[in-house]
């Protein structure tokens, strides 16, 4: 609906509740930081989006196995922010890391694999 300030407020409130109810590196925190990053990205506030996505990734690295698909999604999201910022050389390794994980974790015909391949091809064209 484009009501980013309302979404941000709800996600931040959710995060505050999680801080009371959950252990510090619970995967739920990663989801909340991911959602906050998504809102900031949609608002064009890339540095805030990047910070939220990176925090999500830090938690996922602790809470999830190394080839979990959610890790790949975080790498892809970080790559996307760098891509949106025009920092293509920073975007590429994040996209490649996402691709590596998704190729190990998902069936070869999964749409995420096609998505990240497209992201890699597009960013290479921009470099």
Image (spheres, grey):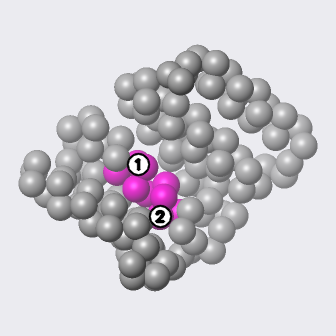
Task: Characterize the local packing of mark 2: few (<14), some (14-19) or many (20 or more) Cα atoms within 10 angstroms.
Answer: many
**Location of residue 8 with respect to 116 vertically, above or below:** above
State which tag comes first along the sequence, 1 or 2: 2
Gap between marks 1 and 2 measured at Cα: 10 Å
**Location of residue 48 with respect to 88 vertically, above or below:** above
Residue 67 horizontal side relative to residue 24, left or right: left
As drawn, the label of residue 78 is 1
Q: Is residue 76 magenta?
A: yes
**Location of residue 71 with respect to 80 vertically, above or below:** below
Task: Characterize the local packing of mark 1: few (<14), some (14-19) or many (20 or more) Cα atoms within 10 angstroms.
Answer: many
Occupied quadrant, residue 33: top right
Q: Residue sitting at 67 percent across and 21 percent down?
A: 9
| First to last magenta residue range | 71-79
Q: Residue sitting at 65 percent across and 48 percent down?
A: 31
Q: Residue sitting at 47 percent across and 64 percent down?
A: 72
Residue identified by numbered label 2? 72
Q: Residue sitting at 34 percent across and 47 percent down?
A: 80
Mark 1: which secondary structure? Answer: helix
As drawn, the label of residue 67 is none
Residue 20 horizontal side relative to residue 40, left or right: right
Percent of width and height locating residue 82: 30, 43
- The outermost residue toward the right is 21
Percent of width and height locating residue 52: 54, 39
Residue 102 visible in the picture: yes
Mark 2: which secondary structure? Answer: helix
Residue 25 visible in the picture: no
Percent of width and height locating residue 23: 84, 52
Residue 6 horizontal side relative to residue 1, left or right: right
Magenta segment, prevailing SS (helix, strand or loop): helix
């Amino acid at each position: 609906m484009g009501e980013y300030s309302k979404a941000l407020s709800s996600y931040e409130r959710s995060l505050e509740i999680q801080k009371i109810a959950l252990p510090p590196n619970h995967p739920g925190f990663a989801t909340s930081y991911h959602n906050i990053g998504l809102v900031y990205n949609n608002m064009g506030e890339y540095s805030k989006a990047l910070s939220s996505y990176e925090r999500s990734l830090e938690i996922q690295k602790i809470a999830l196995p190394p080839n979990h698909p959610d890790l790949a999604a975080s790498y892809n999201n970080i790559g996307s922010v760098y891509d949106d910022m025009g920092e293509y050389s920073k975007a590429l390794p994040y996209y490649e890391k996402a691709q590596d994980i998704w190729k190990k974790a998902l069936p070869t015909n999964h749409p995420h694999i096609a998505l990240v391949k497209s992201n890699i091809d597009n960013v290479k064209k921009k470099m």
